[in-house]
Amino acid sequence: MKRNKAKITWQAQCMGVLLAGPYLVGVAAFLVLPLGMSLYYSFCHYNMLQPPLWVGWMNYRHLLHDHVFWRSLENTLIYAAISLPFTLSLSVLLAVLLNQPLKSQALYRTIIFLPCLVPMVASALIWQWLFNSDVGLIDYLLRGPLHLAGGALAWLTQLFGAAPSTVATLRNLQPPVWLGDPHWAMAAIILMSFWGVGQTVVIFLAGLQDIPKDLYEAAQMDGIGAIGRFVHVTLPLLSPVIFFNLIMGIIGTWQIFDVPYVMTGGGPGHSTTFYTMYLFDNAFNYLRMGPASAMAWIQLLIILFFTAIAFLTAKKWVHYA
Amino acid sequence: MFAKLASRVVVALLAAAALSLLIFGHKPTTYRLPNGQKVRGRTVVTLWVGWTSFEAAAMRSIVNKFNLSQKQIFVHMVSVSQVDTKTVISVAGGDPPDITELGTADVGAFIGHDALTSLEPMVGAGIITPDTFAPDVWKACAPFGTLYAVAVAANPFALYWNKRLFRQAGLNPNLPPKTLAAFDADAQKLTIIGKHGRLIQAGFLPPQQCLWGIYFGNHLYNYRTGNFFIDTPQQIAAYRWFQGFSRRLGYRAVTIFKSGFGQFNSPLNPFLAGKVAMEFSGPYFANFIQRNKPSMAGHFGVAPFPCLNGPPGTQTMGDFDLLLIPRHARHVKAAMTALAFFIRRSNIEELDELHCKPSPLSHFSRSFIRDNPNPYIMVFEGLMLHHHVEVLPPSPIWKRVNNELQTMAQRIWMGAPVKKSLSHAQRLVNRWVRTNKKMAALRAQETR
């Protein structure tokens, strides 16, 4: 009996391996092998057209002296530091609003989610037109309020005896040249990132619907107001979902590529060259697979570092029911 | 029971694999001649070209002629976007096309990475000689002595001017500027600035390209040493001239003005829309003018671009459309037969007539000039035969250098100090050249 059982177990194991076989082959061929090869190439001079040549740490050393590498790192860090918290806050806010028993609730939810269905390249092209400094809708909407605000400020400064040039500048306040000005191009891309909050909002909505209603009732009976209930009930119970979205956001923001690639191409003057864009340039434009692979591994370490920080601090702010 | 189930699963998996192979598996492609006949028993040569639309159609007609003239070879032409990157990937994957179409700058990178097949057998067979092509074309096809490419079209750049706008500005519409000083003066007269410094019409807006220096006497690249000359006095003068446009018109005003421009290949092209009076472009632009704004025919002129030293066009920027055989191509001999056919004078002239481009050959027929739809073809032929056409450097690191120079030009356009920016770029590029040489030496040592 025992022997038979052992035989069955062995056969069952074989069966399991057989069934998982195609997946394991896929993972080995398309994940493990490329990972290993990219690690090897990161220590090689490799241009895809000639065999890799071992150069040790040279690629990593050269990256340390590469000003575009540092610029792309800085740009990505700025983007992640501003876009991620704002996107998460906006998503929570929208999810809470969409969770209210409103008339046409489904319609509002659809409207918020709709932009996620548009391919990012198409969205980027649309936003390129919206940010257009000659015929863009954003500039058109800003011109009126800026004219009014500028006029008021000019009047005030004139009262306090400001220089005529300052007054003239204020009177002629103009919207920024969004994509042509190195100081505003990054702002434009960050603003555009809010366009895709729909996906995160849907996840937060699912999280909000999991929060037991009786907790809100209990809080209400204790005399806690709407803001109090949000801070003391909603946020703590939503924290696992916030944590999940934070991790996904860290990964996503460090991999930003398509939107700046289409909208600005990294310009003007590298002001919107992001990490993944420079990695792509190294790999496929300059045929420098070695530095590109080194950059990919550095990127992995950076994402791991920030994810580790999120996990280490999670104990303090993530509350699992 | 498990053994039975396992065998059933295996049978099912095998059946599924067999079925998918049957449905999606490899099937030999059927090629057809232009007359509808099926191609049987011929060597199929794959040709990748970057041209699209009417430019690709022009090449296809030459390919059709070749296919009809042949019994042994069939050329299968494919129009490919980003043909340079895809050629690299296909060579790396060991399955490149037999012939590919690239620009002059790509040749250097491909030679530097040992990714091309030498065309010296064609020279040996007397099919091509250094006299076949115009001198600068030969230099682009064999930048380091060995022939690696054949040219089928040439793109020397010239000055296009709008005669109507010249007339409106009180300038002689048949007299283009001959010196850079006259050019700047005309550009200023043709510029119209509206309320709040808003640009209504620009005389000229220099594109952010990296060869302006050649109009001031600079040679960007040394073919022998592989070094770049970025911060020479000529380059400083060129970039100061370039920056002058942004300074005079205002960076903000120009950026807003430019954001209203349409696509190059559309009636909203700033030159066609009458927003910019003078344009710096290649011969193909005449084709785009005819297709997008036929009413402009006879109302624009083309002339060599002025130079600081010497008459206009003494030196000019250009590029050539080259056909090459990548390394590991499967049908090298057949590909060379096809190339020999493509570079026959009659075929090149037919292609270039449809492209509105001058011939890259050292001689052209009278009918080529007479029948050419480009009314200014002689201007371009003149540039090809009597002037120096400087092409993008055939350096293995050119794309990286170019990106740096483009960024530098952007910064200069935004107001960065010219000399400092050029020196910075020179230092960087020098370092890359040194590293590249070091790597090449290391690789050579390793190969030995």
Image (cartoon, helix red, strand yellow):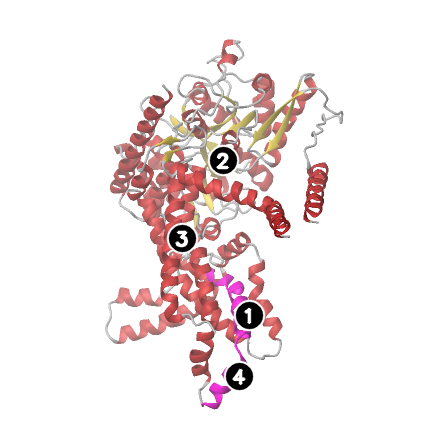
* Residue A117, position as x, y percentages in the image: 58, 59
Residue B177, picture quadrant: top left
Residue linked to disc 2: B85
Are discs 3 and 4 less than 8 Å apart at CB?
no
Q: CA distance from mark 1 to mark 2?
A: 44 Å
* Residue B323, position as x, y percentages in the image: 53, 24
Q: CA distance from mark 3 to mark 4?
A: 53 Å
Foreground pick, A118 / B26:
B26
Question: Callout 4: residue from which chain?
Answer: A
- The local secondary structure at tag 4 comes to helix
Foreground label between 1 and 3? 1
- The local secondary structure at tag 1 comes to helix
> Which numbered disc flags the more N-terminal residue, 4 or 1?
1
Foreground label between 3 and 4? 4
Foreground label between 4 and 1? 4
Above or below — where is B166 with respect to A258?
above
Residue linked to disc 4: A214
Residue A206 circle label:
1
Disc 4 residue crowd, few under 14, some 14–19, many 20+, Cα 10 Å = few
